[in-house]
Each structure stands twice: as C-alpha cells, then as structure tokens.
Image (tube, rainbow, N blue to C red):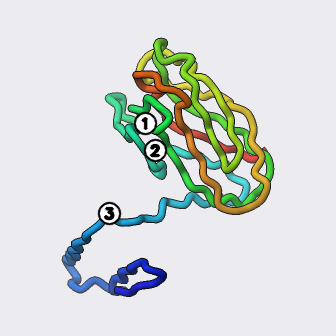
Amino acid sequence: MGRENGAITISLPARSLDENDTVIVMEISAQPVVDPPLIVQGSDEPFELDYLEAVTAGKAVKRFNRDGGFFISKWTGPADSITWHLLVSLPGSYKVSIRYAARENWAKNPYVVTVGARSLTAAVEATGDWFQYRKFDLGEVKVPKAGVYTVNVRPTSVSGHDLMYFQSLILEPQ
C-alpha cells in the first residue's frame, strides 16, 4: 500500500497467495473515489456506447428486460443521466444516433446528448411498446482534437415517468 498526492494505492502481488483460492478483504472508512471506465477508440471505428460502461446518476439505473436485453431506465428529470468517458484518437465530425424504446405517452419529452462541449437536443419519439427499440439519427458533432471527452445523455425537464428505455448511443466518424 502506498500514498501519492493524498490518494492511497493498493498493490496486489503478481501471483496469487494460494494457488487454488485467495480472498483479500479490505475495510474502508469512506466512499472510495474510483476512476470512471475509459472507452478507447479503435482506429476509425465508431463508438458504440451501451449500458456496460455507462455511469448512471440520479434515479437512472441499468436493468434487464423480460425479452433478454439490458437497458437504462428510471430517469425522470435533469439530475438523472448516463455518462461515458471516451479516449478519441480520430478528431473530426461524428454522426450521433441513439437506440431506445418508448411508449406513446413518453413521446415529446426533451433530452440532450452532450459530447465534450457540443450538444444535440431532441425529443423522444414513440417506438411502439415497452421493448420495441428503434434507432434515431440526432445529427453531427465536431470533435476538434484527439483526447478524453465526456459523453452524457439526460432529460432536460421533469416528466414524471421514464424518458425512454435506452439501449445505445453510437458516434460514427464521418
């Protein structure tokens, strides 16, 4: 264990202490500060952002549906959001599209997708029933240079019910 800039670092042995079974127990006295997952771009591949690396905030939660897929729901206001951290290697324009399911009474609820300092606003469109997913093109954003960017999706107003059943956000280099 070491300390650097006020942070405590824990190092584990290179090999397991017991070949068959090792348990390490750690008791901490405060909420840990954990670096968010960083999604690294593979050459000129699009970013496909889903529930797996998403960091949820507020009431937004990752869920498993009865049709066998994961999605994010329970977001009803601006404090409820999902965020990813990307390491972009290819600057330029990116086409942004979103895939979600939304019932008729969820339609027209506004939301914003932010990529770095750029934002795209949209309104939810009905897709049919609970788990009938559709993809919607939201427009393009410019990523001015390579580096780490934060991507965020959130409602812009309070709706009293789910914004959508979010499945994925795709950023495709143009």
Q: Is residue 102 left or right of residue 32?
A: right
Q: Are marks 3 and 2 in contact (CB under 8 Å)?
A: no
Q: Amino acid at mark 2?
A: Tyr
**Badge 1 is on which residue?**
71
Judging by the rendered image, the residue that carries numbered circle 2 is 51
- Looking at the image, which residue is at 21% across and 78% down? 22
Helix, strand or loop at mark 2: loop
Q: Is residue 106 above or below residue 30?
A: above
The answer to whether 21 is drawn above or below residue 121 in the figure is below
Distance Cα–Cα, label 3 vs label 1:
27 Å
Near-viewer residue (94 or 121): 121
User: Which x, y percent locates residue 100?
Assistant: 52, 29
Query: Closer to the N terminus: mark 2 or mark 1?
Result: 2
Residue 31 badge: 3
Q: Amino acid at mark 1?
A: Phe
* Amino acid at dot 3: Gln
The tag earlier along the polypeptide, 3 or 1, is 3
Which residue: 45% across, 38% down?
Answer: 80
Q: In the displayed structure, would residue 92 be above or below residue 112? A: below
Label 3 Cα neighbours within 10 Å, binned few <14 / some 14-19 / many ≥20: few
Q: Residue at x 24, y 86 (%)?
A: 17
Which quadrant holds the C terminus? top right
Dot 3 lies on which element?
loop
Asked where in the image residue 67 lies, by quadrant, the reply is top left
Q: Secondary structure at mark 1?
A: strand
Q: In the displayed structure, would residue 11 be above or below residue 149?
A: below
Residue 141 coordinates in the image, percent (x, y): 74, 42
Quadrant of the drawing holding the N terminus = bottom left
